[in-house]
Amino acid sequence: MPAAQHNDAELVAECLEGRWDAFGRIVERYQSLICSLTYCATGSLSGSEDLAQEVFVTAWKQLPGLGEPAKLRPWLCGIARNIIGKTLRRDGHEPLQGAEPLEAAQGSVAAEPLPPERLISKEEEAILWRSVERIPELYREPLVLFYREHQSVEKVAAALELTEDTVRQRLSRGRKLLHEQVLAFVEGALEETNPGKAFTLGVLAALPLLAASATGATAATAGAVAAKGSATAKTATGVAAVGAVLTGGVIFYFSLLGFLAFLGGCIGYIMGRAVQQSARQLEYVSRFWRSLAVGFAVFVGLPWLLAFGLRLPADSHSGLYHGLTLWMGLIYLLVPAALALWLLRWWRGSAQTNRDAPGPGQTTRKRFFLWLAFGMLFPAYRLTLWLLMVYPLVFDQLSVPSHRLSGAEFQRIVTERKDAEFKVTQYKNGSKTLSIKLPEGRKWAIFYMPAEESTLALLAENHIAYQTYVAGRDFDRLGMPPRFLGLLAFFVAPAGAVLLLMRPGRREFYQQQIDPRQAEKAASKARKAFRAFAVSMALALLAAAIFLALFARWGTRTLSAAEVPKIAAEHRFARFMVSQFDNGSRELRITPRERGIGPFVAPADEATLSVLAQQGIPYSTIVQGRDFGHGTPSPLFLLVCIVMLTTGAVSLLWWAGKGVKPWSPAFRAGFLVVFVLLFGASILCSRDRSNTYVSTVRVKVAEWSNPAFPDDETGIIESKEVLGKVVEKLDLNRKWGRRWSHWLKLTPDETLEQIKRFNLVRVDLIPLGQTGVIEVSVYDVYDNDGQEAAAVGNAIADTYRDYRNHDRPVAQIMEAAVPGQTPLPRFKPAMLVIGAVAGVLLGLLAGAAAARWQAWRTRR
């Protein structure tokens, strides 16, 4: 006992010096005692641990007031009994388990167990408390603590300040009071519920939140965050990985790769048919692959050899690396130029095939195959690297997270996962990204988050080392050209693969040119393949033009300084953003939340910003080179791009149809019918019958709940604690169930699922240092006047304010939501793009089928 008291005094002194690890040892020493006391009073395992965490968090805050550090144990017990008494008086009843009949207790198995600790089921917990509650508290506390302290009478006596004989007597009396049929179960269950390492880490995870502010969060909130931190941050595997992969950007990326592979396959097929026509066509194809082989060696191999073979540092040879970057970029001019030159030669010489020319000799065939192999070498290498990169994801070797880490989850990983690998990547625009790699058996889970100063400071406080990779020094030394070599490989490699599959190296392959009919047949097939290639390129260009036309901000209006106050007053709930460019100029962009209005652009001078300050309108600031790379293109520039894309598409279609007459009456009828049907259907599908209104409420926050992670406020607003109360307050279960489920009342989980599925609530943060403004926008697609959207937005703001102001006033409503005056557009532009592209493609197929059917009937 004297040694323990001496250790307690030393640990308290170390805690007062700010050492969290010392308080962790205090928690490990007395967690069984405090959890046993709270469990004996509450009868709930989870509730007892919540109260115990509240005890330790309260002790951390009140530790400077401890007069006698040697009496730490009775001081903790006193805090525990005070909190237990307040909790019971507040609830006004005994634990629910005590009032619930044993026959009515239902168990539920956890959906995801938390190894290595074991959680007993609700049924076992009910049986446990049903057995223990019958014992008087005089015997209950020693009995519970005895089994949690590995059946040590000495530890129980020291914890309760009793003699060992007294403990033995009370244990004997307590055992007799237990029923013999449940005695064995109680012993095992109590041992399994002993708090472990996760409990200690959960308490420590809450302490940085208290240390970061003057008063800290409330004890209940910190306990909830710590408990959540010990049970979350699970990596997404299986279906979650597939859901993370199937995002819009990744789908577009893989679609682009497939489109490039299709185009390359068409080129390879055309080349295979071209070499069947004459020896001259074989020479043209050989020149193309010779150009690619030499180009890859000179424009790609040489820069890589100088940059990485000689190991020249990038910081001391910046001029050399800049020149190598420009030199490597020439490969993107060489490949299209070589392809265009070969297509022009083939197109002109295809109709003038020299039927009397002798076949290629053995030397010509070997030279052709040699240049083809050299031209395929680098694209095949890049394609193999890409497959090796994608293999872990496709075969579930890499687990991709489906959500961004919150502050509590990141702190849990920092304090608990000693096997985590941290890496900071700094890009050329100044932004930094922190990647966290966690081993999960044979798999890896990788999380990404911004590497801010607070995040790196937390790593430094926990003495965690991390590697820093700087763009231009450790990676990406040659800039942008190497990034798109994979796309180039997806075009070149399929072309060579299809050409090789046609076996151009065998002697019999060239004997067909002796027969003029075979040469004509090969030329006809090559032209058909080229038409497919040209039509595909034209459709891609048209899709890009339609995309730019639909999603460009054509209504951008430049405001003068005198017009800013009026526009700001009319659109108070718009997004106000100041962009600071590299040349020193600043621009204010006002983007109304109602689509079809604005945006408005004005100079961000002192007069303009003073207007926003006078009207109390918050705005965010982004810096070029740190937050974004390039400015938003002007409508005039987008118009020029659209004209160029459309002209290119029309030119390709004209070139592909030159010399043929596809516009027969049957072809025109089939094309127009299919195109009109599909495009008309897309117009109908893009229309939304209901009006969609948006209402926005602003909440001013004097202090973030986690200063190191302001984005955690989004998780609080979208949590079940806040949205669930809003749903219950407005009775959305009944209102929305009447609309969706034929007058059936929805469950709270179903209502929350509908909110997330349709993105009815959007949260935008405007950090202003330790303070900031939160904008909550609610979209209502079921009301005809927007009243419900405003009601939901104000209810969310009120609930969030009450949640944050539990301890002291932190949040206040800055501007309440008002019903939207203008409904959002009733159509989805993406459906028009899909309908136009599908209408052209399927219309061409239908027209060709109709023309063939007409020709068949004419022959009959």
Image: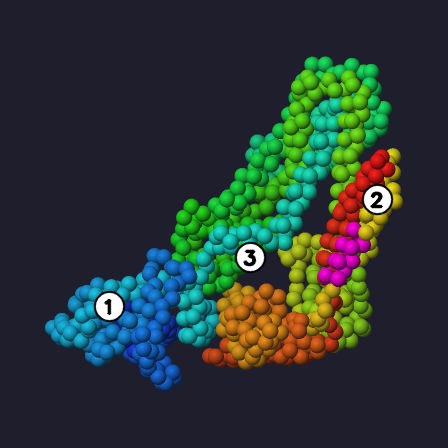
Kind of residue at badge 2: Phe
Q: Is residue 146 above or below residue 390?
A: below
Q: Tell me which label, 1 or 3, sits earlier in the chain.
A: 1
Residue at 33% of width from left, 61% of height from top? 118
Between marks 1 and 2, how big is the CA–CA gap? 83 Å
Quadrant assignment, res 112: bottom left
Q: Which residues are magenta?
A: 674-686
Q: Quadrant of the N terminus?
A: bottom left
Q: Are marks 1 and 2 in contact (CB under 8 Å)?
A: no
Residue at 69% of width from left, 65% of height from top? 577
Q: Are marks 1 and 3 in contact (CB under 8 Å)?
A: no
x and y percentages locating residue 528 in the rendered image: 78, 34
Q: Nearer the viewer, residue 418 or 403?
A: 403
Between marks 1 and 3, how big is the CA–CA gap? 48 Å
x and y percentages locating residue 454 in the rendered image: 51, 61
Q: Within 10 angstroms of label 3, few (less than 14), some, or many (20 or more) residues?
A: some
Of tags 1 and 3, the one toward the viewer is: 1
Q: Determine whether the residue tagged by mark 2 lies in a helix, strand or loop.
A: helix
Residue at 72% of width from left, 27% of height from top? 272
Quadrant assignment, res 550: bottom right
Most extreme residue toward the front is 860
Q: Determine whether the residue tagged by mark 1 lies in a helix, strand or loop.
A: helix
**Residue 451 visible:** no
Residue under numbered circle 3: 450
Q: Within 10 angstroms of label 1, few (less than 14), some, or many (20 or more) residues?
A: many
Residue under numbered circle 1: 186
Kind of residue at badge 3: Pro
